[in-house]
Image (cartoon, rainbow, N blue to C red):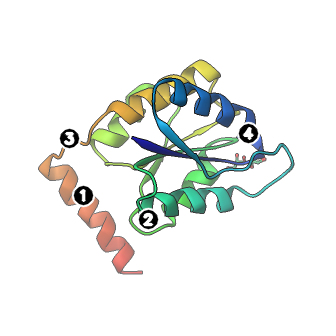
Amino acid sequence: MRVGIANDHAATDLKFKVMEHLKEEGYEVINYGFDTHDSVDYPIAGEKLAMGIKNNECDLGIAICGTGVGISIACNKVKGIRAGVCSETKTAALIREHNDAQIIAFGARIVDEKTAYELVDTFLTTPFSNGERHIKRINMLKEIEDRQ
Ligand code: RB5
């Protein structure tokens, strides 16, 4: 599986640790984020990752900023992309099972390293349920985009 990852300055160290963790697990990892501790802008990284998924350069994505919120909002601005912020594994599983989210977002200032590994492992290994009610609701999200 090809996994995209993106971050701002608040999450550079955690991004590199998560990349290493994923490579050890055999994932191909594509870095769309910033490799600096200098102040940078999370919308740039979020858009790059979301476009990478939209253009089928990668299958799923990981977005990390200070809280996970700013970068997730950026990802969700890209048509067809669903990103969810998580700080525990139940939500990390449910955003795949129910929302078919392509991107998990979390905060480097919120979760520790071990939790970050658990979040990405859960997210990347949980399939979409394909439940009829969930498909219907995802289609409703697409209709919202089409009405803009
Ligand atoms: C950067 O200081 C911080 O605002 C950013 O990483 C993120 O938390 C925004 O949502």
39 left or right of 5?
A: right
Q: Secondary structure at mark 3?
A: loop
Crowd class of label 4 (few under 14; some 14 to 19; many from 20; radius 10 Å): many
User: Of callouts 2 and 1, which one flags the residue occurring earlier in the amino acid sequence?
Assistant: 2
Image-quadrant location for residue 12: top right
Amino acid type shown at disc 1: Arg
Reading the image, the residue beneath label 2 is 55
Nearest to viewer (mark 4 / mark 1): 4
Name the residue furthest right.
38
Image quadrant occupied by the N terminus: top left
Residue contact at pointers 2 and 1, CB within 8 angstroms: no
Task: From the image, tell me which residue sits under label 3.
Answer: 129
Q: CA distance from mark 2 to mark 1?
A: 23 Å
Q: Are marks 1 and 3 in contact (CB under 8 Å)?
A: no
Q: Nearer the viewer, mark 3 or mark 2?
A: 2
Q: Is residue 5 left or right of residue 97?
A: right
From the viewer's side, name the closer residue of 51 and 128.
Answer: 51
Q: Which residue is mark 4?
A: 12
The quarter in which the C terminus is drawn is bottom left
Residue tagged by mark 1? 137
- Image coords of residue 85 (percent x, y): 51, 42
Q: Tell us which disc is closer to us: 4 or 3.
A: 4
Disc 3 marks a residue whose amino acid type is Ser
Category of crowding for the residue at label 3, using alpha-carbon neighbours closer than 10 angstroms: few (below 14), some (14–19), many (at least 20): some
The amino acid type found where label 2 is placed reads: Asn
Q: Say whether disc 4 or disc 3 marks the residue closer to the N-terminus.
A: 4
Q: Secondary structure at mark 1?
A: helix
92 to 48, vertically: above or below? above
Q: Residue at x 66, y 61 (%)?
A: 43
Q: CA distance from mark 3 to mark 2?
A: 23 Å
